[in-house]
Amino acid sequence: MSKRVLVTGAGGFIGHHLVRYLVERGCYVRGVDLKYPEYEPTAAHDFQILDLRRWDNCLQATAGMEEVYGLAAEMGGIGYIESNKAVIVRDSTMINMNSIEAARVNGAKRFLFTSSACVYPGYRQKESNVTPLKEDDAYPADAEDGYGWEKLYFERTCRHYREDFGLETRVVRFHNIFGPLGTYDGGREKSPAAICRKVALVEDGGTIEVWGDGLQTRSYCYIDDCVEGIYRLMRSDYPQPLNLGQDRLISINELVDLVSKIAGKTVQRKHNLTAPQGVRGRNSDNSRLREVLGWEPRVSLEEGLAKTYRFIYGELEKAGRIRALAGTAA
């Protein structure tokens, strides 16, 4: 085994995929979360159910680990993060501070923190045709209230631990990661999964609800590219925050059209203008990603959405939610 590594949040979407990726590369992987992965067994050599808000649990989780991939967090889609700010800030701060300090105390060599594009200022994201966001654009700060501020604060914490304690830290800023085995229902799902679910459940020619006017824009990065980017960053000598995402800007209306085409359906849109919709536009500038890693995400949005749709459709079918709707098989 080349490395003994810990993945926190290993029962979640990105964490589960990352565990499998690291195991395939010969690492001994310990996974920790409050829950096991939902859709398939973990590939971790050692999986522990631990609440990382507790200091003693973080000491247990990091014991004997050379590297820590810190993915555990309290989070969800835009509806969830706008209505649970105190819980998000409280829980994620406790998880992150306990995890990095326990990693230091137990002699880990590297610690990776998964930040978010939500650290970028609102004043740079007021137009649909947004200028792609560079890493340096995070300041002067005006992060997403609650979730984004907690992420930005902990980015600085990583810097201080590196400079003062000598713990090698890496910081990755995710831009809308999606793919199979992720949450697609219940309020914590992101927009690609929510749209896949809605399109899968609607009859051909039917109508789905779209939050906002659908002209808000984002870029989306497929999970396989995400975990490869995380691994490449951890192996690099680059200590500053780094974007990880696609740089293809697309509107929510266009995203609905792409999913509808994959499903082979004609779908109408009903816009809910009072629903949470986040910033008006957000896109990743990948210049530094290409420079630092000599690499960038490769999986097209169409390919990633097709795989995601098939997974979500299959789960809905297994749950009996597709069969209950006459004439909706894709």
Image (spheres, rainbow, N blue to C red):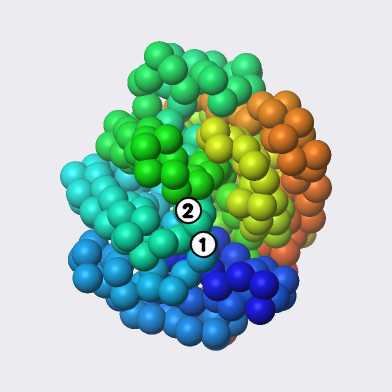
Q: Is 257 located above or below residue 285 in the figure?
A: below
At label 2, the amino acid type is Phe
The answer to whether 242 appears left or right of 225 in the picture is left
Q: Residue at left 20%, top 49%?
A: 90
Q: Nearer the viewer, residue 32 or 120?
A: 32
Q: Residue 229: give x, y in percent of width and height.
A: 68, 50
* Location of residue 281 (image quadrant): top right
Q: Nearer the viewer, residue 128 or 68?
A: 68
At label 1, the amino acid type is Glu
The answer to whether 290 appears left or right of 283 in the picture is right
Q: Quadrant of the N terminus?
A: bottom right
Q: Residue at left 61%, top 70%?
A: 3
Determine if residue 277 is in view: no
Q: Residues within 10 Å of mark 2 (few under 14, many from 20)?
A: many
Q: Residue at left 55%, top 72%?
A: 4
Q: Is 139 located above or below residue 115 in the figure?
A: above
Residue bearing the label numbered 1: 67
CA gap between label 1 and label 2 equals 6 Å
Q: Quadrant of the C terminus?
A: bottom right
Q: Residue at left 56%, top 37%?
A: 239
Determine if residue 228 is in view: yes
Q: Residue 172: give x, y in percent of width and height.
A: 55, 43
Residue bearing the label numbered 2: 111
Of pointers 1 and 2, the one earlier in the residue sequence: 1
Q: Residues within 10 Å of mark 1 (few under 14, many from 20)?
A: many
Q: Is 89 located above or below residue 194 in the figure?
A: above
* Location of residue 33 (image quadrant): bottom left
Q: Residue 156: give x, y in percent of width and height.
A: 38, 33
Q: Marks 1 and 2: CB-CB under 8 Å?
A: yes
